[in-house]
């Protein structure tokens, strides 16, 4: 499970931040916890709507995609901090990411009560109309005497306290599993598969369906190539090194941006007939409607379903196994949402690979074997071996079209 944890203080030094950082380290096997700060959130003022500012958009997008939220609140004058209250006001004004979202409350304070009164107040706020979050009754973690509670490494010293915190987190994880069944996916709007909504990186003046789009677009924007260096988040590589790195991946990779324009695939020199997801160079730059133009209308709707599901944050990824392939192939596709710095949807990263060699290696390395049938036979729907499009109408877990990212359900 993936949780976001909101630091309920805008102070540089905060025991509540330390508490969340400890949870992040201590329970990394149980769940993924990402810390969110509220330092840059403006003071709430309904006459000066700042719902579109980066800090609020970022929180909104992160919360929408999380399975649950953990809030660590200090206690100021028997209540939560002004910074946290202002943040919750923004997240219940124009935007409502906490609606039907499970929330766990924790808190650390200098004194014995461990933010008990602030937590009671916070529960009332989270239950208010416009917020409508779900909180698990009685699941309270109150860390008192915070100055003495942590060692020099930021770890909680008392083993009994750590055990109780783990119990509270375990309860919350189970609660999230129950509440998730009550959540309704955000409605999917019609997708424009013709690239009709240009974005900041859209290259204008060249028809996306031009078979020479890559060369013409590269020339228009002065794209670098060869041994020109590119500074990445965590590295410095030349364009040639990037190409070698991506082409050496044991996967077929593709990318389409949030304007639904197909922009990249690796393994350029591989014959399309040998690929699980057949691609050709002339498709680079194409509209998604063109890439999947041979699909019948019903299955084009499946393309929209996958894109809309990822765009809305209803799911962070869509995975499928395409049956109907030879026994030595388990045709596996993963459609992963990508995000801009503010957390908004930036397109789809598709990974396609034959899972069979990986499975065989794992079974041999661990001395295990499959029982009860093969993975391919267990696939939930029949699919066309060429397009991968599922015809399992009405299934609870739609099976995506391995070529188009489509589910017919």
Image (spheres, helix red, strand yellow):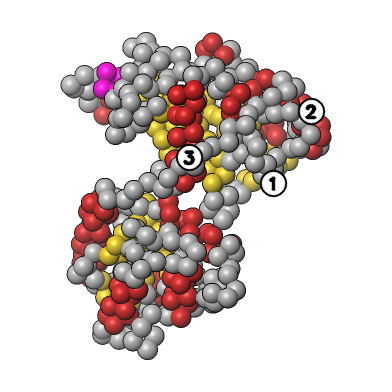
* Viewer-closest of 219 and 232: 219
Image x and y of residue 38, in percent: 50, 70
Residue 200 marker: 1
Considering only order in the chain, which callout, 3 or 1, is on the residue closer to the N terminus?
1
Q: How far apart are marks 1 and 2 (CA)?
A: 18 Å
| Residue at 41 percent of width and 48 percent of height | 186
Residue 240 occupies quadrant: top right
198 on left or right of 346 = right
Q: Distance between the residues labelled 2 and 3?
A: 30 Å
**Relative to 230, does residue 32 appear above or below in the rendering?**
below
Count residues near mark 3 (Cα–Cα under 10 Å), then give few for <14, some for 14-19, many for 20+. Answer: some
Q: What element carries label 2?
A: helix
Magenta region's main secondary structure? loop
Q: Is mark 3 on a helix, strand or loop?
A: helix
Image x and y of residue 274, in percent: 52, 12
Q: Name the residue under label 2.
A: 216
Q: Mark 3 points at which residue?
A: 308
Count residues near mark 2 (Cα–Cα under 10 Å), then give few for <14, some for 14-19, many for 20+. Answer: some
| Residue at 65 percent of width and 37 percent of height | 196
Q: Which residues, given as a range, are shown in magenta?
A: 375-379
Q: What element carries label 1?
A: loop
State whether residue 305 appears in this view. Answer: yes
| Rendered-image quadrant of the C terminus | top left
Image x and y of residue 80, in percent: 38, 80
């Amino acid at each position: 499970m993936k949780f976001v944890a909101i630091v309920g203080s805008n102070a540089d030094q905060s025991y509540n931040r330390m508490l969340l950082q400890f949870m992040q380290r201590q329970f990394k096997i149980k769940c993924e916890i990402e810390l969110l700060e509220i330092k840059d959130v403006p003071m709430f003022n309904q006459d000066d709507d700042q719902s579109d500012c980066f800090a609020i958009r970022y929180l909104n997008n992160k919360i929408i995609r999380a399975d649950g939220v953990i809030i660590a609140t200090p206690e100021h004058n028997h209540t939560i901090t002004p910074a946290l209250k202002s943040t919750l006001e923004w997240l219940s004004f124009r935007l409502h990411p906490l609606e039907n979202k499970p929330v766990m409350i924790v808190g650390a304070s200098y004194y014995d009560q461990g933010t008990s009164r602030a937590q009671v107040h916070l529960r009332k706020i989270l239950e208010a109309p416009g917020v409508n979050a779900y909180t698990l009754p009685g699941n309270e973690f109150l860390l008192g005497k915070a100055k003495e509670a942590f060692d020099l490494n930021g770890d909680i010293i008392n083993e009994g306290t750590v055990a109780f915190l783990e119990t509270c987190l375990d309860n919350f994880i189970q609660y999230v599993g129950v509440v998730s069944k009550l959540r309704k996916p955000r409605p999917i709007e019609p997708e424009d598969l013709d690239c009709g909504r240009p974005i900041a990186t859209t290259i204008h003046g060249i028809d996306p369906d031009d078979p020479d789009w890559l060369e013409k677009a590269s020339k228009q924007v002065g794209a670098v190539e060869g041994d020109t260096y590119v500074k990445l988040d965590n590295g410095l590589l030349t364009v040639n090194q990037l190409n070698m790195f991506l082409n050496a991946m044991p996967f077929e990779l593709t990318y389409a941006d949030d304007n639904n324009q197909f922009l990249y695939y690796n393994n350029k020199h591989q014959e399309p007939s040998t690929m699980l997801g057949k691609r050709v160079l002339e498709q680079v730059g194409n509209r998604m409607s063109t890439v999947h133009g041979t699909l019948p209308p019903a299955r084009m709707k499946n393309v929209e379903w996958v894109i809309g599901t990822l765009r809305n944050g209803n799911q962070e990824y869509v995975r499928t196994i395409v049956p109907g392939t030879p026994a030595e192939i388990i045709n596996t596709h993963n459609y992963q949402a990508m995000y801009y710095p503010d957390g908004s949807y930036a397109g789809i990263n598709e990974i396609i690979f034959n899972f069979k060699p990986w499975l065989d290696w794992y079974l041999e390395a661990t001395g295990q074997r499959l029982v009860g049938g093969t993975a391919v036979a267990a696939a939930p729907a029949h699919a066309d071996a060429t397009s991968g499009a599922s015809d399992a109408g009405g299934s609870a877990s739609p099976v995506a079209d391995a070529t188009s990212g489509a589910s017919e359900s």
